[in-house]
Amino acid sequence: MTLKEIYDNMDSFTDEERAEIFTKVFTLFSPPSHSTLRDFQNKWDRRKSFEEFVKAQNETIRLCLDMEMSPMGELIRRGAVMTGILPKIDWDYEVKI
């Protein structure tokens, strides 16, 4: 499944699919995206429903993917890609499920 397919379809994933897919997507993210996701989770109002959490988390993951694909995201990733820490990604990058 490509990153673009994940981006477009994440609202329809089952809980099991979300867990598997997002674990793999998270490993592709640069430190700013990791921080964004941690911030989101740490500030989440735990009195809200799990469904609300999923919807808001999906939007945060989309934001992170948008950041990763932006010119600034490419610049941030460049050093990590050159040293093999992170792969070079684009919307067609295949996430092995």
Image (cartoon, grey):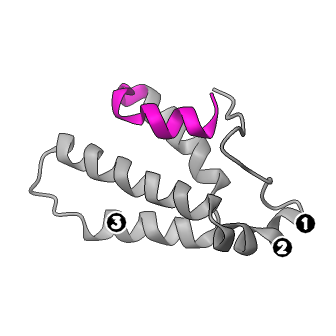
- How far across and how far down the image is residue 83, in percent? 90, 67
Circle 3: element type: helix
Q: CA distance from mark 3 to mark 2?
A: 26 Å
- Name the residue type under label 1: Met
Of callouts 1 and 3, the N-terminal one: 3
**Magenta stretch, main secondary structure class:** helix
Q: Residue 72: which quarter of the image?
A: bottom right
Magenta region, residue range? 1-16
Q: Quadrant of the C terminus?
A: top right
Give the amino acid type for the residue marked by disc 3 in the picture. Phe
Residue at position x 28%, y 44% from top?
54
| Residue lying farthest to the left in this orientation | 47
Residue 78 horizontal side relative to residue 63, left or right: right
Q: Quadrant of residue 37?
A: bottom left
Residue at x 65%, y 68% (from the top left corner): 73
Residue depth check, mark 3 versus mark 2: number of the one nearer the observer: 2
Using the image, determine if residue 8 lies above or below residue 65: above
**Tag 2 near tag 1, CB within 8 Å:** yes
Please indicate whether residue 97 sits to the left or right of residue 61 in the image.
right
Residues at marks 2 and 1, CA–CA distance in whole angstroms: 5 Å
Q: Residue at x 49, y 72 (%)?
A: 35
Tag 2: Cα neighbours inside 10 Å, few (<14), some, or many (≥20)? few
Residue drawn at 11 percent across, 53 percent down: 48
Rendering coords of residue 13 (x, y %):
39, 27
Which quadrant holds residue 42?
Answer: bottom left
Q: Considering the numbered disc 1 on the image, is that residue within a helix, a strand or a loop?
A: helix
Mark 1 sits on what residue? 82
The amino acid type of the residue labelled 2 equals Gly
**Which mark, residue 40?**
3
Quadrant that contains the N terminus: top right
User: What whole-number distance in Å separates the C-alpha atoms at marks 1 and 3?
Assistant: 29 Å
- Can you identify the residue that label 2 sits on? 79
